[in-house]
Amino acid sequence: MQYAVGIDIGGTKTAIGLVDANGQALAKTTLPTNPSSPSHMVDEIAAAANKLMEDSGVSASELLGIGIGAPGPLDTKRGIIAEPPNLRSWWGFPVVDSFRRHFDSHVKLAFENDATAAALAERWIGAAKNADHYVYMTISTGIGAGIFSHGRLITGATGNAGDIGHIVIDPAAGLCQCGQRGCFEYIASGTAIARMASELLGRPVTTKEAFELALSGSNAAAEELVRRVFRYIGVGCVTMINTFDPELIVIGGGVSQVGAPLFDTVTDYIRHHALNPSGRETAVVPAALSQDVGLIGAAALIHIAYK
Ligand code: ADP
Ligand code: ZN
């Protein structure tokens, strides 16, 4: 059997897993992401990966490669973490070269943005098996997408394709951290829902609480806010449908856990607003993989993407 190590670098934690050729994680661990010293963090990740192999009895010769997923913007062509807002001290860090120093030259290294890796995982063992035209959308702290078209990952020139969180949806809505106004992420991410609900109710409200208030029918203003957000997510899906003509959209990330109210509203929006008749029938389903999606996707970069 051949194995890959999948590494999912996040703003607060990094997940590392030893994954077999069937997408099963034999062993996994997490480390807090070191915000100040990326090269020290890479040393720690490499040590943790070696320990997972040792503990599982996997030898160095069975290690096919190391897949790395990280938040964008990045530059996969040069193997660099470019400018992720949640990893400021990592800006410009040559993450691929840094991992190279820890592993034999026969070990492959692959690097893509985290939403692209998650899209690959869902297609490998999740909700999008065998889908050749499909978009994975994550609605979490931010919003991003991974795109499959004609059976191939669409990554762009530098690995940043699918940064749909910064498609402008409502310029009147306010200033996004990217400098544009009314970005998708600014009005429909988990962060945005909590911000808007807190402004509305005049006290700190979490995304989950905003959903509870809205869906129990106990607060009409919260209900209106949440319905508006779900419609915005529908707008994002229609934009993807009109651009890529997918057969399937998979939605993951913390916000998707609200379930049917979101999926029903989005499906209804698509039925009415996708431009072409077949697009109006596009299936929208929840992601099948949850917290391991990042590391499995990173491992999938080695097992299936670059074979
Ligand atoms: P990350 O962005 O770090 O990948 P998540 O995918 O869990 O993490 O997304 C975090 C966002 O999702 C937060 O805004 C959080 O409030 C929201 N969220 C997490 N779980 C739920 C839930 N069960 N219901 C609604 N929102 C949730
Ligand atoms: Zn923006």
Image (cartoon, rainbow, N blue to C red):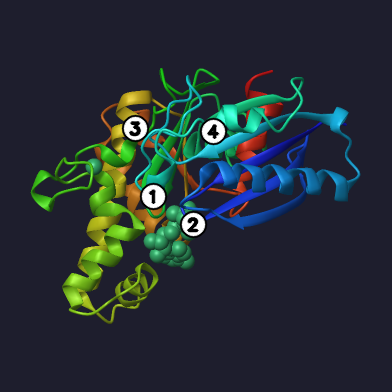
User: How far is the residue under mark 3 from the one under mark 1?
Assistant: 26 Å
Measure the C-alpha gap from mark 4 to mark 1.
Answer: 16 Å
In the picture of the structure, the residue carrying the numbered disc 1 is: 86
Point out the tag, 3 or 2, that comes first from the N-terminus: 2
In contact (CB < 8 Å): disc 1 and disc 2: yes
32 lies left or right of 43: left
Residue at x 38% of width, y 57% of height: 262
Residue 12 tag number? 2
Q: Residue at x 66, y 40 (%)?
A: 6
Callout in the foreground (3, 1): 1
Report the front residue among 49 and 178: 49
Marks 3/4: CA–CA distance: 30 Å
Query: For the residues marked 1 and 2, what is the alpha-carbon distance in whole angstroms?
Result: 8 Å
Which residue does the numbered mark 4 point to in the structure image?
95
Q: Secondary structure at mark 4?
A: helix
Give the secondary structure at mark 2.
loop
Q: What type is the residue that disc 1 sits on?
A: Asn
- The three-letter amino acid code for the residue at tag 2 is Thr
* Circle 3 residue: 240
> SS for tag 3?
helix
Q: Kindly indicate the quadrant of the structure image that contains residue 29.
A: bottom right
N-terminal label among 2 and 4: 2
Q: Is residue 186 above or below residue 58?
A: below
Give amino acid for label 4. Answer: Val
* Residue at image coords 29%, 78%: 217
Between the residue at mark 3 and the residue at mark 2, the CA separation in whole angstroms equals 29 Å
